[in-house]
Amino acid sequence: MKPKWLSFLLVLFLLTIVSLANTGLLPDSIKQLYNFPYGDKLGHFLLTGLANFILNWIALGSRSIPKTASVIWRVSLIFAFFVTLEEFSQQFFPRRTFSLLDLAFNYAGILAGAFLVWRLKK
């Protein structure tokens, strides 16, 4: 599968999860994954970290890019911008709850994903 398609599918997957959560239609099987203390926070960390890792991995490709750190920062900041918008948008959905702690775990996941891809591409 071409990297652009993989990026598109990842974004589509994330948008699907957000849409299902916004409408209260998130399947119980997914809700059960977070059914332990701070499970929601771990979910934020893992989901954003993995997504950021994949987006950066695709952006860097298999070729050697001299400014790897620059690409990683750009991709990560763009992703963080959209994650921030999504978290703040939760204030307008009755089934969602805006949380600065969730946002902090999102940012921590984004940083972890960026660091991991940087270490592997270095």
Image (cartoon, rainbow, N blue to C red):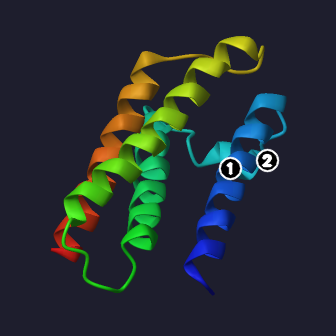
Mark 1 highlights which residue?
Answer: 30
The location of residue 3, given as percent across then percent down, is 55, 78
Farthest front residue in view: 66
Q: Amino acid at mark 1?
A: Ile
* Left or right relative to 79: residue 69: left
* Left or right relative to 77: residue 93: right
The location of residue 2, given as percent across then percent down, is 60, 84
Image-quadrant location for residue 13: bottom right
Q: Please say if 53 is above or below 107.
A: below
Q: Mark 2 to mark 1: distance in Å? A: 6 Å
Residue count near mark 2 (Cα–Cα under 10 Å), binned few <14, some 14–19, many ≥20: few
For label 2, the SS is loop
Q: Marks 2 and 1: CB-CB under 8 Å?
A: yes
Residue displayed at 28% across by 66% down = 117
- Depth order, front residue of 97/70: 70
Mark 2 highlights which residue?
Answer: 27
Q: Amino acid at mark 2?
A: Pro
Residue displayed at 47% across by 44% down = 79
**Quadrant in the picture for the N terminus:** bottom right
Q: Please say if 30 is above or below 77.
A: below
* Left or right relative to 62: residue 58: right
Image-quadrant location for residue 91: top right
The location of residue 72, given as percent across then percent down, is 30, 57
For label 1, the SS is helix
Q: Please say if 44 is above or below 10.
A: above
**Quadrant in the picture for the C terminus:** bottom left
Residue displayed at 57% across by 26% down = 85
Q: Please say if 25 is above or below 15.
A: above
- Depth order, front residue of 32/4: 4
* Left or right relative to 66: residue 35: right
The location of residue 114, given as percent across then percent down, is 29, 55
Residue count near mark 1 (Cα–Cα under 10 Å), binned few <14, some 14–19, many ≥20: few
